[in-house]
Image: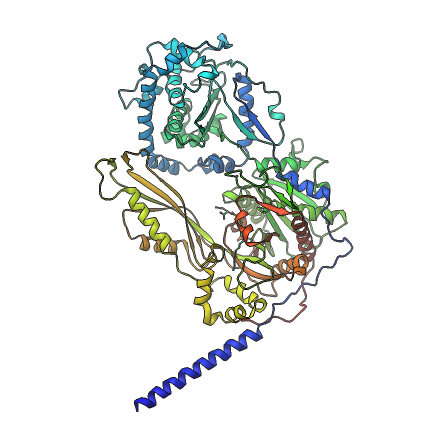
């Protein structure tokens, strides 16, 4: 009886194995390539667009920057104001400029949520305390007489002081009380009893003396000088470097001139010492800077590569105090009661609109102003007479900008919305999008300079080449070409170029979408940046794959914080804030979010690609019903493929501790998750809490975005087929196959979800595995040939999309 049962079980198992094997074999050999519906767009009357020298030149120009620098020297107030004006013109560009470069809070008023600012202030308490203690050190430094002694030995640089304008604003009188008063040891009198000598001490430092006038000393000395209402007439401005294309704003700024002032001003700059760059700060006030008058203070701070937090913080406190005081008539500021360096920008900003204050935030190294330059390249200008925006005649794309079929609107000052008017209003419009901004270059050890657009071995190097000026200029080139060849579209289409995609697009794309919505526009489809033509990236596929993002992962950025009592490092508790937080981070990294492979559009990737794979892969990929776990595991090995399998976890920042012998009372880290479309922000937080399993770790959401809906990639969906066909028209001769996929990063498309269901993400970039790290990384580049392909890709998209509908060429492929 027992033997009979065993026999039955074995037979059944063999049968199951046989059936499964048969099913696998059948599936493997019956999967067929997917359908292409659109007829190939032949090299027709308008021909193929060749990338001639001029076209490459136009693209190079969009990537290039020149550097303007302020050399070490002494500037008079007019010169400084010129510089301020110039910087103002930069900072007034997009908020991301300052935000990206020096990590200040966004500077525009609408971005400054008062509660958040106050929260930030709360968060900074520990630091502020520390700043206070460094102030004590500063005062002691001055008290010790080092600086004074040095100066008294100095042969003074004579300064041209305009004695007619010596009245200083009276807001400095209680400055130190406000900021240092909680410590009775710190008073202005600590520095010296002789106000005049202090003043001359500050005002007459020679350049050689600057190493002794350390940042630590500058703050209190200035305070003292201000406190005594004395003349502060000469300070040094040292090497400050900016980048901009045209120099006209700074033309003829003389160097090394004595500094005179009309009312009140000072500028501070660090010196380089032991290869460390110290803090920089300046405040320039125009005549009439007094209570009751219209304020006109430009503050200019720069956070820098210094490792010396003390310096930075102390000077910022001084500046903050000045600004707070100067802005004391502004309700917002007094309400916020802000002190502390990080709040400076917000403080200044909060009065910017009312009192003509302009926040100015600069970096001590290069400022890279892509948006501004790009607009210059298009020679964009405001025609104030007609209150409309217009373009000069000699710009790079004259046909586009002069065509009666094209209208251009400027959105949120810097973003651009083009409408190309079609003749048939029955056809639903579509939209092409790209962005004008780029990310900064944290290091410049590139094979070619990142902002020179040099061509090396057939590749144009430059920030923005693949992210994503090739899209912006590819579209403009294609449209220029088409219009020149009398193209008159039937279907209306829009082109949207946002200016702040790299910091979430909340001004540019958001406002463009808002405008289109207000006009009741609904799009057939929208095409934005995305993966690209990937060669050797997807396991098992030897052909290049045109991967089109049909959905986009969400994200949540979390702040993890631990606070303990801190104390003296000689008597430590068993656990520290740093240790507890590190443990939490380790738990997150060693417990990745579970694989959800196959529940999102990545399933479609493999369904489309299976027929193209080599046999073993083909067998596995066409039978995902059986091999999901195996495939998921293999894909998890590499960061690029792992990104489509699960919600990812990236620990991007960690801050704690200020001194070797102080136990850090507070530690915090930033964790950035990219959320798979089958999960939500809440799922992610719940998972993290469970994994961390420690109530001492406080978790707060900094920013989040749910994953975006999955757009259809059915063969009868117009937008999908337009994109697919156009890819094949350009890259088909390499044997390229097209597949839907998941966009692992974020784009501007989230802002357009209300005006279309069909959003596709594809960049016309040909990418090898090693190219993926060029996004936001070193040696971003595109080959001249690839740029030509990008232009032709958009040419085909525009031509294909102008048809009323697409006819099938083959039958539909089978579902897997
Ligand atoms: C089997 C499939 C393999 C999939 C491989 C994926 C390959 C993806 C290739 C390229 C994708 C790079 C796209 C870069 C786009 C950059 C856009 C960007 O950086 N956006 C910012 C937006 C910030 S908004 C808060 C971002 O951080 O995501």
Report the colour scheme: rainbow
For residue 669, side relative to residue 82 (left or right): left
Instruction: State whether residue 229 appears in this view.
Output: no
Whole-percent x, y for residue 223 in the image: 38, 18
Residue 155 in the image: state x and y as whole percent. Answer: 46, 9
| Camera-side residue of 352 and 303 | 303
Question: Is residue 477 in view from this perspective?
Answer: yes
Relative horizontal placement of residue 223, taking residue 380 as reference (left or right): left
Q: Is residue 204 above or below residue 124?
A: above
Residue found at x 54% / y 74%: 28
591 vs 777, left or right, is left
- Up-down: is 715 above or below 153? below
Depth check, front residue: 196 or 297: 196
Q: Quadrant of residue 271?
A: top left
Foreground pick, 467 / 535: 535
Q: Image check: 304 left or right of 656?
A: right
Q: Up-down: is 663 above or below 185?
A: below
Question: How many discs mark residues in the rendered view?
Answer: 0
């Amino acid at each position: 009886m027992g033997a009979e049962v065993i026999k039955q079980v074995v037979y059944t198992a063999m049968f199951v194995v046989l059936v499964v094997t048969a099913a696998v074999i059948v599936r493997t050999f019956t999967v067929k390539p997917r359908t292409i519906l659109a007829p190939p767009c032949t090299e027709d009357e308008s021909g193929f667009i060749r990338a001639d020298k001029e076209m490459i030149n136009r693209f190079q120009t969009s990537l290039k920057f020149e550097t303007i620098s302020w050399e070490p020297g002494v500037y008079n107030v007019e010169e400084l104001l010129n510089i301020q004006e110039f910087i103002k013109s930069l900072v007034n560009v997009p908020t991301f400029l300052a935000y990206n470069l020096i990590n200040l809070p966004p500077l525009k008023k609408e971005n400054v949520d008062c509660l958040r600012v106050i929260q930030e202030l709360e968060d900074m308490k520990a630091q502020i305390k520390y700043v206070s203690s460094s102030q004590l050190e500063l005062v002691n430094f001055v008290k010790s007489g080092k600086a004074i002694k040095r100066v008294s030995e100095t042969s003074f640089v004579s300064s041209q002081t305009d004695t007619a304008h010596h009245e200083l604003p009276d807001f400095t009188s209680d400055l130190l009380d406000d900021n240092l008063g909680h410590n009775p040891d710190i008073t202005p009198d600590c520095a010296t009893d002789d106000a005049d000598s202090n003043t001359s001490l500050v005002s007459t430092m020679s350049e050689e003396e600057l190493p002794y006038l350390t940042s630590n000393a500058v703050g209190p000395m200035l305070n003292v000088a201000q406190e005594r209402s004395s003349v502060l007439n000469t300070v040094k401005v040292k090497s400050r470097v900016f980048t901009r294309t045209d120099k006209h704003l700074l033309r003829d700024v003389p160097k090394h001139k004595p500094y005179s002032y009309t009312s009140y001003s000072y500028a501070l700059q660090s010196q380089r010492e032991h290869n460390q760059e110290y803090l920089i700060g300046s405040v320039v006030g125009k005549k009439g800077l007094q209570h009751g008058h219209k304020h006109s203070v430009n503050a200019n701070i720069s956070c820098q590569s210094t490792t010396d937090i003390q310096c930075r913080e102390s000077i910022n406190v001084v500046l903050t105090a000045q600004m707070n005081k100067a802005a004391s008539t502004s309700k917002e500021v007094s309400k916020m009661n802000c002190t502390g360096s990080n709040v400076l920008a917000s403080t200044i900003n909060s009065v910017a609109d009312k009192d003509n204050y302009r926040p100015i935030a600069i970096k001590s190294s290069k400022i890279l102003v892509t948006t501004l330059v790009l607009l210059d390249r298009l020679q964009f200008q405001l025609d104030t007479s007609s209150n409309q925006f217009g373009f000069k005649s000699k710009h790079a794309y004259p046909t586009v900008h002069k065509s009666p079929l094209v209208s251009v609107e400027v959105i949120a000052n810097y973003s651009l919305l083009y409408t190309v008017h079609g003749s048939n209003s029955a056809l639903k419009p579509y939209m092409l999008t790209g962005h004008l901004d780029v990310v900064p270059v944290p290091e410049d050890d590139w094979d070619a300079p990142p902002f020179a657009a040099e061509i090396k071995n057939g590749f144009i190097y430059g920030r923005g080449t693949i992210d994503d000026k090739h899209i912006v200029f590819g579209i403009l080139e294609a449209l220029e070409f088409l219009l020149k060849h009398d193209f008159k579209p039937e279907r209306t289409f829009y082109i949207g170029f946002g200016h702040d995609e790299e910091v979430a697009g909340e001004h540019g794309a958001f406002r463009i979408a808002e405008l289109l919505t207000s006009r009741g526009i609904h799009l057939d489809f929208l095409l934005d940046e995305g993966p690209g033509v990937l060669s050797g990236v997807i396991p098992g596929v030897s052909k290049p794959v045109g991967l089109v993002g049909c959905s986009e992962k969400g994200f949540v950025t979390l702040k993890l914080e631990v606070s303990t009592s801190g104390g003296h490092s000689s008597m430590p508790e068993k656990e520290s804030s740093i240790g507890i937080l590190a443990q939490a981070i380790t738990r997150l990294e060693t417990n990745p979010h579970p694989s959800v492979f196959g529940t999102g559009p990545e399933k479609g990737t493999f369904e489309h690609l299976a027929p193209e794979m080599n046999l073993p892969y083909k067998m596995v990929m066409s039978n995902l019903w059986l091999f999901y776990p195996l495939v998921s595991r293999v894909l998890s090995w590499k960061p690029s493929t792992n990104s489509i399998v699960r919600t990812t976890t990236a620990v991007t920042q960690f801050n704690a501790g200020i001194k070797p012998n102080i136990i850090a009372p507070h530690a915090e880290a930033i964790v950035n998750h990219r959320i798979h479309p089958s999960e939500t922000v809440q799922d992610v937080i719940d998972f993290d809490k469970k994994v961390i399993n420690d109530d001492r770790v406080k978790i707060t959401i900094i920013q989040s975005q749910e994953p975006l809906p999955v757009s259809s990639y059915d063969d009868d969906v117009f937008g999908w087929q337009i994109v697919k066909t156009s890819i094949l028209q350009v890259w088909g001769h390499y044997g390229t196959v097209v597949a839907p996929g998941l966009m692992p990063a974020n784009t501007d498309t989230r802002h357009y979800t209300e005006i279309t269901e069909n959003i596709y993400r594809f960049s016309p970039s040909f990418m090898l595995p090693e190219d993926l790290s060029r996004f936001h990384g070193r040696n971003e580049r595109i080959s001249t040939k690839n740029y030509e392909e990008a232009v032709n890709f958009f040419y085909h998209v525009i031509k294909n999309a102008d048809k009323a509908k697409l006819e099938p060429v083959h039958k539909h492929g089978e579902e897997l």
